[in-house]
């Protein structure tokens, strides 16, 4: 997945800029339905084949169901009562023969960047599923060398401005990035990146009364290091398209220090065993490993985590200390979601990337001390 590391950096800055308010305020609550029109373009890549596929601007439409909850728990208060919802997204990629359409269904959170009763500036984060009817086919669609599977991961990052016309209606406009690819589960996997401007209207069909909210003060910085251990695995396919899928396994340690209710900062280490690297070394460099141990990769990393109650968004930057395979470089990135099922049990879904290239999706579980 391309540009994820850049998006991650922007995300960190935006969330850290939020102001902690220790007072009471009034907000609208209720259930909202939003219809948005988008217009934009596919982000060009360095490959000439991708640029040939781009034949015009991209119109899109989106339908959102959103809830503005009463601010009645700690994580909602820490983020000034964000909006949560689910979106259906449909885009015409202006190349019916090779690219066709792109569809998506994803949950999202609108984080307040400016708080006011009559207007609002929000930053949206959405992670869900994307569907592409037109994918690579050696016989029927060989020019589409960017999408190899019908089902993909979809990421949406957006800056939105809302203006209330009445207690039940508001207008919105914004600009954002939507990314769709499969995490190298099936090649080709360059992915689609859409840059779009949007405008739309929202209508509230339930309670629109003001409710008093209390912005919970952040807890003091913790001196305690919170340790977590995660084991995850996945599958990745190597070029050419239609090749073998190889298993990948990751063992991770994370040591976090809590900054406040919204943020944790830490360090860690990763041990990787990616069987695809054995085939890559043999194919590209004619190197045959003498033992499985030679295929083990070891990395050190720094980590930042955005926490929203039991849900978190980890953003990690690491470097390989030992790796026989160097075809992906020495730096790796990770972004995704983790859910703390219990005070000790963690569900993990993350994407491992090497700058502009996705390696594999990590499905796993963890234990928190």
Image (cartoon, grey):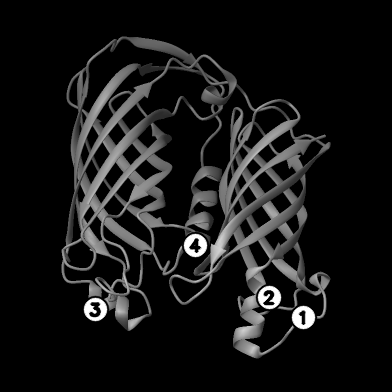
Residue ID at (51%, 69%): 357
Query: From the viewer's perspective, is residue 77 above or below residue 151?
Result: above
**Mark 2 vs mark 4: in front:** 2
The alpha-carbon separation of the residues under discs 1 and 2 comes to 7 Å
- Lower sequence index among marks 1 and 2: 2
Mark 2, secondary structure of its residue: helix
Q: What element carries label 1?
A: loop
- Comparing marks 4 and 1, which lies closer to the viewer? 1
Image point (35%, 46%), residue name: 159
Q: Is mark 4 on a helix, strand or loop?
A: helix
Query: Horizontal placement of 50 versus 221: left or right?
Result: left
The answer to which of marks 3 and 2 sits earlier in the sequence is: 3
The disc at residue 52 is: 3
Residue 289 position, x and y percent, is 77, 80
* Residue nearest the viewer, comparing 187 with 221: 187
Instruction: Mark 2 and mark 4 in contact? Answer it, CB < 8 Å.
Output: no
Q: Distance between the residues labelled 3 and 2?
A: 33 Å
For this orientation, the residue located farthest to the bottom is 286
Of badges 4 and 3, the one in the foreground is 3
Q: Do the residues labelled 1 and 2 touch (CB within 8 Å)?
A: yes
Which dot marks residue 6? 4
Decide which of tag 4 and tag 3 comes sooner along the chain: 4
Q: Is mark 3 on a helix, strand or loop?
A: helix
Q: Residues within 10 Å of mark 2 (few under 14, many from 20)?
A: some
Which of disc 1 and disc 3 is earlier in sequence? 3
Is any atom of residue 271 visible in this view? yes
Name the quadrant containing residue 288. bottom right
The residue wearing badge 1 is 289
Q: Nearer the viewer, residue 26 or 229?
A: 229
Q: What's the mark number on residue 278?
A: 2
Answer whether labels 3 and 2 touch (C-beta < 8 Å): no
Provide residue 228's location: percent of width, then percent of height: 77, 41
């Amino acid at each position: 997945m391309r540009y994820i590391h850049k998006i991650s950096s922007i995300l960190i800055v935006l969330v850290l800029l939020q102001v902690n308010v220790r007072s009471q305020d009034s907000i609208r609550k209720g259930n909202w339905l939003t219809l948005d029109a988008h217009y934009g373009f596919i982000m060009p890549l360095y490959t000439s084949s991708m640029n040939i596929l781009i034949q015009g601007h991209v119109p899109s439409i989106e339908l959102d169901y959103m809830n503005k909850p009463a601010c009645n728990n700690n994580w909602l208060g820490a983020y000034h009562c964000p909006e949560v919802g689910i979106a259906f997204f449909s885009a015409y990629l202006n190349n019916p023969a090779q690219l066709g359409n792109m569809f998506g269904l994803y949950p999202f959170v609108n984080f307040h960047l400016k708080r006011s009763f009559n207007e609002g500036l929000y930053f949206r984060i959405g992670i869900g599923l994307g569907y592409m009817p037109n994918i690579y086919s050696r016989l029927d669609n060989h020019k589409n060398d960017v999408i190899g599977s019908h089902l993909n991961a979809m990421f949406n990052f957006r800056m939105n401005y809302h203006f209330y016309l009445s207690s039940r209606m508001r207008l919105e406009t914004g600009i954002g990035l939507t990314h769709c690819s499969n995490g190298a589960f099936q090649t080709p996997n360059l992915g689609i990146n859409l840059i779009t401007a949007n405008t739309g209207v929202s209508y509230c069909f339930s309670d629109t009364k003001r409710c008093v909210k209390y912005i919970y003060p952040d807890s003091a910085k913790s001196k305690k290091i919170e340790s977590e251990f995660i084991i995850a695995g996945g599958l990745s396919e190597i070029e050419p398209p239609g090749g073998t899928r190889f298993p990948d396994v990751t063992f991770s340690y994370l040591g976090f220090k809590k900054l406040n209710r919204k943020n944790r900062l830490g360090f860690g280490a990763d041990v990787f065993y990616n069987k695809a690297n054995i085939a890559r070394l043999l194919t590209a460099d004619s190197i045959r490993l003498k033992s499985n141990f030679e295929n083990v990769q070891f990395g050190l990393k720094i980590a930042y985590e955005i926490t929203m109650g039991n849900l978190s968004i980890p953003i990690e930057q690491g470097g390989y200390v030992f790796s026989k395979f160097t075809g992906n470089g020495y730096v790796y990135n990770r972004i995704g979601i983790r859910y703390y099922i219990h005070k000790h049990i963690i569900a993990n879904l993350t994407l491992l990337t090497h700058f502009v290239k996705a390696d594999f999706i990590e499905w796993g579980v963890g234990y928190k001390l």
